[in-house]
Image (cartoon, coloured by chain):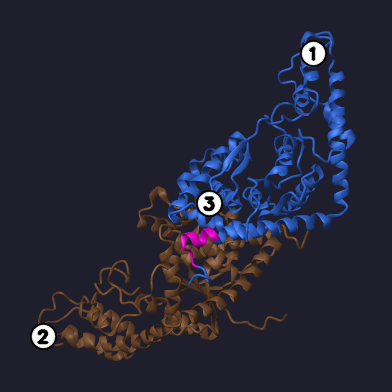
Chain colours: A blue, B brown
Amino acid sequence: MLNVDTRPIVLTGDRTTGALHLGHYVGSLKSRLALQEDHRQFILLADAQAMTDNADDPGRVARNVVEVALDYLAVGIDPEKSVICVQSALPALAELTMLYMNYVTVSRLERNPTVKQEIALRGFQRDIPAGFLCYPVAQAADITAFKAGLVPVGEDQLPMIEQSNEIVRRINRQAGREVLPEARAILSTVGRLPGIDGRSKMSKSAGNAIPLSAKREEISEAVQAMFTDPDHLRVNDPGCVEGNVVFTYLDAFDEDPAEVEELKAHYRRGGLGDMVLKRRLDERLQALLGPIRDRRADLATRPDFVIDVVRAGTERASKVAEETLDTVKAALGVFSFGRS
Amino acid sequence: MLNVDTRPIVLTGDRTTGALHLGHYVGSLKSRLALQEDHRQFILLADAQAMTDNADDPGRVARNVVEVALDYLAVGIDPEKSVICVQSALPALAELTMLYMNYVTVSRLERNPTVKQEIALRGFQRDIPAGFLCYPVAQAADITAFKAGLVPVGEDQLPMIEQSNEIVRRINRQAGREVLPEARAILSTVGRLPGIDGRSKMSKSAGNAIPLSAKREEISEAVQAMFTDPDHLRVNDPGCVEGNVVFTYLDAFDEDPAEVEELKAHYRRGGLGDMVLKRRLDERLQALLGPIRDRRADLATRPDFVIDVVRAGTERASKVAEETLDTVKAALGVFSFGRS
């Protein structure tokens, strides 16, 4: 069979621990909409990875598979262009992980900066689940299963790509030829969107997020509550733009950057009130999120359709992943009934 | 469907790192022949586990899948009675392992006495492959996939059963009901067969083994070379029975224990030469191994038949393991397309 699909392959995805929010939109969904136009994009509903630190609540992880799929379709991920698939429903990923685990040492995993940081973040200390320690290996399985050459990540996730490439080189060396391609990071050019409190990045657990499904009033309330410049008490006072969440959001969501720059200058000089800015941001967010919310609500009334879309994507992904597994096994010389 | 098979379920198997020898016969194969008569016995060709410390030579591991299968059939493992299956060809085992890894901490694995001992034995120190550290979890997947209540092991492997049962209890607690049964060890009543040098247990790598495929002369030479009592220089001298490998083997292989006891008494008194004993042992081993060698040689001329037997066993095993995986996932509430 001639493989005529020469588009570069991208792997991306989300741990299914909660519905997605504006931070995800800015940080990844938006670029996925662009990527799907000229890349072969696999988007993983990473429920197996979510289990590595949510093993006490598998039900939540499972429910959010559907929630995140709804978010994808609502923002415009097109299942004809992108392959949306469920990680736990792809046995080849588990098989590749188990195979790769023989080529990575425990100490190498313990030195992984991302893992170290996340272990501290979660307060795991010595009670790290084995699955959590090994999740960089599982990510290598995800990346290589689809032979992805490109992986969009934040800077803090670069060690994961490095770990994957180490495994790729080890496998290729063992096989004596290039079986798997190395992957390159697509580094996000936009910073992490802060939560409406401005204190940390937007996250559901921090309670500072605007979900993609947010209702009109919910959005307005969030904008009203948004952190600006606490010393900007009177309209005529000069205001501070840096750390002012409303401006950060205008930078992210306003379609007229020149006008936003003028507003910043005005705000700095004094004479521009928060309410004017918040009204403008509210309009922009309503315009962005309104259609997403409506599509999402509509799709939510057709769960069978959503499941069918994800099932079809998973089947497509499964074919690719199984093929890679067979290729890797054959290249290493692992037992197969076909090649006794 | 009514499940009428109420025989107790046994899981056993061998890492496929080399063809089997007399030590395996005494230590496990013989009891498997008995077990298959009234147990539902699954025998795992554990090539995936063999990879945890043979990742630099997957080809050897793969070749020995067939060699060990030949050994099984040659000694009389009956594929109608026992299910012979290939570990790496059962994706459900990898999937269960990945799932269980979320319920076991790294420190718990590091404390596993068997793992600690084997790490020392292999000189891994800090360069332990992640797959090796996690192999007790993979064993738990093996045991539970077939819902085995019985696992024949040596005393040194008891911590593996304990680890498996810990996972079983954790899963059952998480699910709120008994999803998986705990397993019990069948402890071997026979000691480990020493190699012909008497210095350590029989093993191919120690060069002190008699393979099940040994030719007539090979057996005779091994018996001739066998360690006896180095101080028993003249026939009339009293000889030592303890540590005398010929007597250890007569205990293991002679069908007339009473006569062996008489020979021991005679040897202790003096007047019984090594040659007489070695001739007796040689006869016994030739009688045991001759038919095994012949059947093995015959089967080796029909590799397709052997592969077909193993393929059929693997298919039977796969059905059982997939069913267990589905049960465990459903009990935990892991995502499934069936239960959106």
Q: In which quarter of the image is residue B278?
A: bottom left
The three-letter code of the residue at mark 2 reads Asn
User: Are the residues flagged by discs 2 and 1 in contact, CB closer than 8 Å?
Assistant: no
Dot 1 falls on which chain?
A
Query: Quadrant location of the N terminus of chain A?
Result: bottom right
The three-letter code of the residue at mark 1 reads Tyr
Front in this rendered view, residue B223 or A11: A11
Q: Is residue A42 in the magenta section?
A: no
Q: Residues within 10 Å of mark 3 (few under 14, many from 20)?
A: many
Dot 3 falls on which chain?
A
Q: How crowded is mark 1: few (under 14 residues within 10 Å), some or many (20 or more)?
A: many
**Can residue A146 be seen at all in this image of the molecule?**
yes
Total number of numbered labels?
Answer: 3
Q: Distance between the residues labelled 3 and 2?
A: 70 Å
Residue B293 located left or right of residue B269: right
| Label 2 in the same subunit as label 1 | no
The residue at 28%/79% (across/down) is B248
Q: Can you tell which mark lies on residue A180?
A: 3
User: Are the residues flagged by discs 3 and 2 in contact, CB closer than 8 Å?
Assistant: no
Residue A294 located left or right of residue A49: right
Between label 1 and label 3, give the one nearer the viewer: 3
Front in this rendered view, residue A281 or A260: A260
Element type at mark 3:
loop
- Residue behind mark 1: A267
Q: Can you tell which mark lies on residue A26?
A: none
The three-letter code of the residue at mark 3 reads Leu
